Each structure stands twice: as structure tokens, then as C-alpha cells.
Image (tube, rainbow, N blue to C red):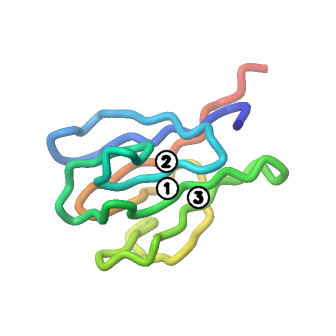
């Protein structure tokens, strides 16, 4: 579990402004109601992408689950990519901003 979880914020469409906390080791994004982040987006697969957190390195990464429409980080299609504070993550037609929560030390 991430000490300072990351936040994914939707930046477009009808759900603009919605935020999701990404604190688990794996957060599944897709259309399926069983996913951690369920999106009503026809461009998204049932299980589209997974955001992973590595506790040892304190790093996040996204992995596309071999989808037709792919996953993009900062406009570039990726199979797997590290995520940095301020990155834009796109799945289907849904665009997120990725932000690391700031520590409260």
C-alpha cells in the first residue's frame, strides 16, 4: 500500500473532475463493473490497463492489457510505461492526469 497514494483525475467528458485514489499494488481500469476504476467509455476494453505500484522503488507504472485501442502516456501509445507526477494517461476516450500525493512530513 502506497504511503502517499497517487490520484487519477478525469480531464474530459461527462465525468470530468472525478478523482480516483491509486494506493494498491495493482489498480485495474476498464469497463467491467469488477474493475477498480470502472469507466463508461466504448473505447475501453473490459479490462483495459493496470496501474502498478512498486513499494521498493516507490514508483508507479501503467501496463496496457493488449487492448485494441491501446493506452497512451502523454499522447504516446505504450505497452508499459513508468508514470511521473503530472503525466497524462489516456485509456479509450478518457484522459486522466496522474498526480502523486504530497507527503505531510
Which quadrant of the figure has residue 95?
Answer: bottom left
| In-image side of 8 versus 56 (left or right) | left
Q: Nearer the viewer, residue 97 or 31?
A: 31
- Classify the position of the N terminus by image quarter: top right
- Residue highlighted by disc 1: 87
Picture residue at 53% right of the left edge, 67% below the top: 63
| In-image side of 49 versus 30 (left or right) | right
Q: Considering the numbered disc 1 on the image, is that residue within a helix, a strand or a loop?
A: loop
| In-image side of 56 versus 52 (left or right) | right
Picture residue at 68% right of the left edge, 32% below the top: 4
Distance from Cα at disc 3 to Cα at disc 2: 7 Å
- Residue highlighted by disc 2: 98
Circles 1 and 3 in contact, beta carbons < 8 Å: yes
In the image, is residue 76 above or below residue 96? below
Q: Position of residue 37 (x, y in %)?
A: 39, 44
- Residue highlighted by disc 3: 83
Circles 2 and 1 in contact, beta carbons < 8 Å: yes
Picture residue at 29% right of the left edge, 34% below the top: 17
Crowd tier of the residue under label 3, counting other residues whose Cα lies within 10 Å: few below 14, some 14–19, many 20 or above: many
Q: Nearer the viewer, residue 59 or 87?
A: 59
Q: Considering the numbered disc 3 on the image, is that residue within a helix, a strand or a loop?
A: strand
Crowd tier of the residue under label 1, counting other residues whose Cα lies within 10 Å: few below 14, some 14–19, many 20 or above: some
Distance from Cα at disc 1 to Cα at disc 3: 6 Å
Circles 3 and 2 in contact, beta carbons < 8 Å: yes
Q: Nearer the viewer, residue 95 or 37?
A: 37
Picture residue at 67% right of the left edge, 50% below the top: 53
- Classify the position of the C terminus by image quarter: top right
Amino acid at each position: 500500500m502506497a504511503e502517499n497514494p497517487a490520484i487519477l483525475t478525469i480531464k474530459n467528458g461527462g465525468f470530468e473532475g472525478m478523482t480516483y485514489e491509486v494506493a494498491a499494488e495493482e489498480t485495474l481500469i476498464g469497463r467491467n463493473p469488477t474493475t477498480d476504476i470502472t469507466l463508461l467509455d466504448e473505447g475501453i476494453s473490459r479490462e483495459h490497463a493496470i496501474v502498478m505500484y512498486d513499494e521498493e522503488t516507490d514508483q508507479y507504472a501503467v501496463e496496457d492489457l493488449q487492448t485494441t485501442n491501446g493506452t497512451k502516456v502523454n499522447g504516446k501509445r505504450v505497452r508499459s510505461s513508468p508514470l511521473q507526477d503530472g503525466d497524462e494517461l489516456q485509456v479509450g476516450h478518457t484522459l486522466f492526469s496522474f498526480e502523486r500525493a504530497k507527503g505531510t512530513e
